[in-house]
Image (cartoon, rainbow, N blue to C red):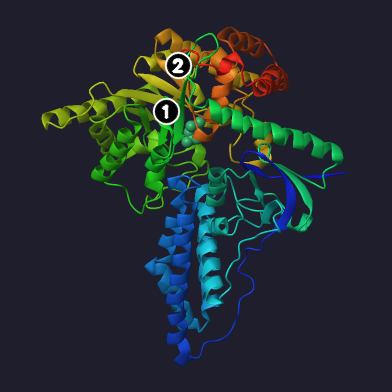
């Protein structure tokens, strides 16, 4: 009998291999009291350790530069910044001076103190930054006690990396020819480790409670990075089933990568615009723009979150300009600052909130602090002179909020004109549809916007009253719920009636199981994490518009989530398999764009 352990799906894909434990704690360190006359010498050891770790991080950055996105390589910049932070250094030195602790202990104490501060934060993303600190502490201690970390090579055998957590520096010891998957006992989907795993294309599951206790090195396991489950000691049948799925996945990967430059049209000629979601200008620069219609969602908040203070207007102009210039005429949809909820700004004091996700976030915060909004909109307008920029407002709840933002935009454009500053007078203003109450009033909202983009991540969480980040209710977060589909259908209909475009930029846009359904409901623009684009394109090219509509009509008539899921599975699975079997199939030919 196999045993099934659950965690958070962090990077998609299937892996079958033996587990290998890695120990990543700061446990085994020397402990001694530093005599007063030796304090200076003890502190002196810190510079050497910082130098060693800096060098190894820079080497790692270089080594990974070709393998992961440029943006993700910058994760190591965040670590280098901690390493060279003056306050951090002083705190460690004080610990040695005042408490006569040896450096290893001083480091452990300071890291633990900092971690405590991060861990106490409500915000998941900030809590996960504690992992970077731990990683730095571990590397410094390693340098002090001169433990070099060897690359792990299991005699040429494939393996699953298992540890309490996967930290950025661990990427340096992976044998990338043989690492098949990553399983960790702690950590979340937004940790730097998880981001790196996705970027490296290694299937990963994080937060598997008790994984290190339940397994030993050498145990055979199946990792299902789509479902977030690990099967320990799999049965022969399970192994056979997953081996079949794994080989299907490999053939999918190679088939879909051949197809990525083909036009995104259904076999009967309906175009579906596939766009990318990006979190920074570096992500955008790493894209194969020829494979897509543009950027449907540029989450600008990440550029704000990784800084120590608000970027100035000039800094923002430089960033947005770089983005529109590298998009080379394709649209870049800049979403204005969407902080609050689970995305705090370290340098902007927000009040404690009992329900931050229902609180002061997105446009609510920006309208309360108009300077933030003015500066950002002005910067986007200025960049729009040299490329195709669009503006997208997050967390809109009322028509009057949109009207207020339009007024701000009008004031800003009048001011730019008066000062002879160029901008795109046709710039489009859109809103995210993620607050459910917008749906019944969408026709009135559409009168005052140029486009809408459906943020299903939040829309589904608010419709179902299920926290999108809460593991305990994760099963209930199901966008196949009949009510969700009916709401999506209403949105598509309202947009169609108004002649304005409605795209989807939540995660379901990148989930190929949803593609025919979304086309059938009336959506013609889908924006997703770029890694999912080829699969979605394969689906677009596999179903005619009539088939999509028929599927949507049948799904909309159903009463149970499971029925809809089964229907979609029945329709997609055979087509998916057939597409992968027949490379000469017509749908892979050059259908009209
Ligand atoms: C959404 O809510 O679907 C969305 C795209 O925005 P975010 O995931 O950034 O909240
Ligand atoms: Mg959202």
Compared with residue 505, is residue 283 higher up or lower down, i.e. above or below? below
Give the secondary structure at mark 1: helix
Picture coordinates of residue 481, whole percent (x, y): 65, 22
Percent x, y for residue 80? Answer: 43, 61
Nearer to us in this view, 37 or 409 = 37
Q: Is residue 164 left or right of residue 330?
A: right
| Number of residue marks | 2
The secondary element bearing badge 2 is classed as: loop
240 shown above or below 142: above
The C terminus appears in which quarter of the rendering?
top left
Q: Which residue is mark 2?
A: 441
Q: Is residue 561 left or right of residue 125?
A: right
Q: Residue at x 46, y 59 (%)?
A: 79
Residue 585 placement: quadrant:
top right
Q: Residue at x 43, y 52 (%)?
A: 74
Label 2 crowd bin: few (<14), some (14–19), many (20+), radius 10 Å: some
Q: Residue furthest front?
A: 584
From the top left corner, tell me how far across and down residue 568 is, in percent: 67, 19
Relative image position of residue 311 (x, y in whole percent): 30, 47
Q: Nearer the viewer, residue 401 or 211?
A: 211
Q: Please name the residue that numbered disc 1 is placed on.
A: 290
In the depicted structure, whether residue 82 falls above or below residue 261: below
* Ligand 1 within 8 Å, label 1 CB: no
| Residue 371 appears anywhere in the view | no
């Amino acid at each position: 009998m196999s045993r099934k352990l659950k965690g958070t799906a962090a990077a998609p894909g299937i892996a079958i291999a033996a587990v290998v434990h890695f120990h990543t704690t700061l446990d085994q360190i020397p402990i001694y009291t530093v005599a007063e006359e030796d304090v200076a010498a003890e502190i002196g050891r810190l510079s050497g350790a910082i130098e060693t770790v800096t060098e190894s991080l820079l080497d790692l950055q270089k080594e990974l530069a070709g393998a992961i996105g440029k943006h993700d390589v910058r994760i190591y910049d965040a670590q280098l910044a901690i390493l060279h932070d003056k306050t951090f250094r002083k705190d460690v030195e004080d610990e040695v001076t005042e408490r006569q602790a040896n450096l290893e202990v001083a480091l452990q104490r300071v890291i633990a103190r900092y971690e405590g501060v991060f861990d106490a934060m409500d915000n998941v993303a900030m809590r996960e930054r504690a992992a970077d600190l731990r990683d730095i502490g571990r590397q410094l201690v390693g340098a002090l006690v001169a433990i070099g970390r060897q690359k792990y090579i299991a005699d040429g055998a494939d393996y699953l990396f298992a540890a309490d957590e996967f930290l950025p520096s661990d990427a340096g010891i992976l044998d990338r020819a043989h690492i098949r998957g990553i399983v960790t006992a702690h950590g979340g989907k937004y940790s730097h480790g998880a981001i790196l795993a996705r970027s490296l294309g290694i299937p990963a599951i994080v937060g598997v409670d008790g994984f290190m206790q339940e397994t030993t090195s050498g145990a055979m396991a199946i990792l299902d990075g789509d479902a977030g489950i690990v099967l320990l000691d799999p049965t022969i049948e399970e192994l056979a089933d997953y081996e079949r799925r794994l080989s299907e996945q490999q053939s999918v990967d190679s088939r879909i990568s051949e197809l990525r430059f083909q036009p995104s049209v259904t076999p009967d000629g309906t175009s579906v615009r596939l766009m990318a979601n990006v979190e920074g200008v570096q992500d955008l620069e790493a894209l194969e723009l020829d494979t897509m219609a543009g950027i449907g969602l540029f989450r600008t908040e990440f550029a704000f979150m990784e800084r120590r203070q608000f970027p100035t207007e000039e800094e923002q102009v430089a960033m947005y300009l770089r983005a529109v210039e590298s998009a080379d005429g394709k649209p870049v949809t800049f979403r204005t600052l969407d902080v609050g909820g689970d995305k705090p700004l370290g340098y902007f004091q927000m009040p404690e909130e009992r329900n931050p996700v229902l609180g002061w976030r997105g446009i609510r915060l920006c309208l309360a602090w108009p300077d933030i909004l003015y500066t950002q909109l002005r910067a986007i307008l200025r960049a729009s002179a040299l490329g195709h920029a669009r503006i997208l407002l997050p967390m809109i709840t009322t028509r009057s909020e949109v009207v207020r933002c339009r007024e701000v935009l009008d004031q800003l454009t009048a001011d730019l004109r008066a000062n002879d500053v160029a901008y795109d007078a046709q710039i489009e203003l859109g809103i995210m549809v993620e607050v459910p109450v917008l749906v019944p009033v969408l026709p009135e909202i559409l009168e005052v916007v140029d486009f809408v983009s459906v943020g299903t991540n939040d829309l589904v969480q608010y419709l179902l009253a299920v926290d999108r980040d809460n593991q305990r209710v994760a099963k209930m977060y199901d966008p196949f719920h009949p009510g969700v589909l009916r709401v999506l259908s209403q949105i598509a209909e309202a947009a169609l009636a108004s002649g304005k475009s409605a795209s989807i930029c939540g995660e379901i846009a990148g989930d190929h199981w949803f593609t025919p359904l979304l086309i059938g409901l009336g959506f013609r623009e889908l924006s997703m994490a770029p890694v999912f684009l080829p699969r979605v394109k394969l689906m677009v090219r596999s179903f005619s518009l009539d088939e999509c509509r028929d599927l949507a009509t049948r799904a909309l008539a159903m009463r149970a989530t499971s029925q809809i899921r089964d229907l979609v599975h029945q329709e997609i699975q055979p087509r998916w398999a057939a597409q992968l079997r027949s490379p000469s199939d017509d749908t892979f030919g050059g259908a009209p764009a």
